[in-house]
Image (tube, rainbow, N blue to C red):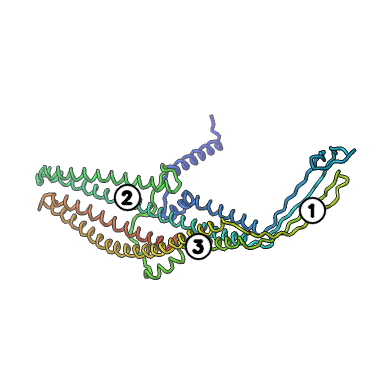
Amino acid sequence: MRRNPCSFFIFVLFVSIVSRSAAQQDAPYRLTLRDAIGKGLQANLSVLVADTQVQEAEGTRIRRLSAALFPRVRSQSYVNFQNRNLRAFGISAPGFPSVVGPFSNFDFRVSADQNVFDLQGYRSYKASEDAVEASKLSYQDARDLIIRAIAGLYLDAQSASARADAAQTRVTDSQALYQLAKSKHDAGTATGVDVLRAQVQLANDQQALLATQNQYKQALLALARNLGMSPGAPIELAEQLRFETLNHPSAEVIVGSALLARPDYLSLATQHRQIVEQQQASHARYLPKLSLSGNYGGLGRSIGSVQGTYVVQGQIDFTVFDRDRSGEAQELASRLKRVDDQIADLRRGIEQDVRAALLNLQSTADQVAVAQQGQDLAERELKLTQDRFQSGVTNNIEVTTAQDELARAQENYILAVSSYMDAKFALARAAGGTEKNIDQYLRNP
């Protein structure tokens, strides 16, 4: 049977596409820190809730604006069919019926109300504008906090990956040491204790490797969960842990700019203005309110007899006695004091955060330098002890001791670099404008 070349080509193409799709699905997603931050901002619940609060405050602002400045227009139409008991209204006369009707009414009318002078409503509207601005700043603060949290989770995963790589290196060295001890034992130049000691060291390093690999997988699970991804989604880090220095201005300069950039501080300042507007609205409750209202429509006994009628009236309202105002004034004064206390405390907290981050940067930078030196020395010591053991000058006790010292030196270096990078992220948060300025804390030196 002859094959159709066209059908065969389509079949091969289909198999190729399916195979490529399956390969793409199996390949892990390479996640950079910037990608992680972007996904976290899109999926985090705190950011989503803060966004709804902005929309809610905007709706309140529109309502206050409508009540203070815009007219209210209504349309009403009715038709009725009724009779009346005149005696019930005190109307009676000899020979005059007590019940009149039935008769009908037709009324089609458009009514409008407009505030001409309402200072309380206007101040309430201005307070709602400040509330919208405060909610927007709180929303931005939530985004900055999420950036800080996601950067910390990504850093945890980087540290776990570095520990797993270091553990794998130690397993490789222990396997080489075991093979060397076994070869020397077979040649009669090493004892069985040397072989057993190498086996124990290899087993310990293999166990440590399994533990660090599990910690790395756990860190990826936590990272994926906070990015809105399935915890089982295959991901891998596109950026490994490394030391990147950061140039920064003095603490005084950073504190001064932070007070102008921190959204949580600016939100409290806006809340202060909002309460002041509410206080002015409360004071305006005793001022007169001037409004105009009117209606126009048709009224008649039947549709054919409907005639146009209208009413236009002005109204002035005075509040003569309102005990509620004193309670409202006390509430607003208490809220204003609370916000002022929060502002003062946060100002000190911002300075503390900035200075603490700078101290940590300096300290951890020094620790990285010392840890790097210690790691280099430990690697040299291990190489020397391996050469001594291979030359038969000593047994492998020195080698296993050097391996343990190298493991400690590697852990010290990873911890120092992780602490330095975390201090950079802490400074980014403390200085304010985290989302806007995060690139300067992520870029390479």
105 and 179: which one is in front?
Answer: 105
Q: Is residue 367 left or right of residue 125?
A: left
Q: Nearer the viewer, residue 8 or 274?
A: 274
Q: Amino acid at mark 3?
A: His
| Residue on which the image places disc 2 | 160
Q: Secondary structure at mark 2?
A: helix
Q: Which residue is mark 1?
A: 296
The amino acid beneath tag 1 is: Tyr
Mark 1 secondary-structure assignment = strand
| Relative to 180, 298 lies left or right | right
Q: Whole-percent x and y of residue 163?
A: 29, 51
Gap in angstroms between the C-alphas marked 2 and 1: 77 Å
Classify mark 1: residues with Cα within 10 Å, few (<14), some (14-19) or many (20+).
Answer: some
The mark nearer the N terminus, 2 or 3, is 2
- Answer with mark 3 or mark 1, whichever residue precedes in sequence: 3
Q: In the rendered structure, find residue 369 and report the number of the disc placed on it.
A: none
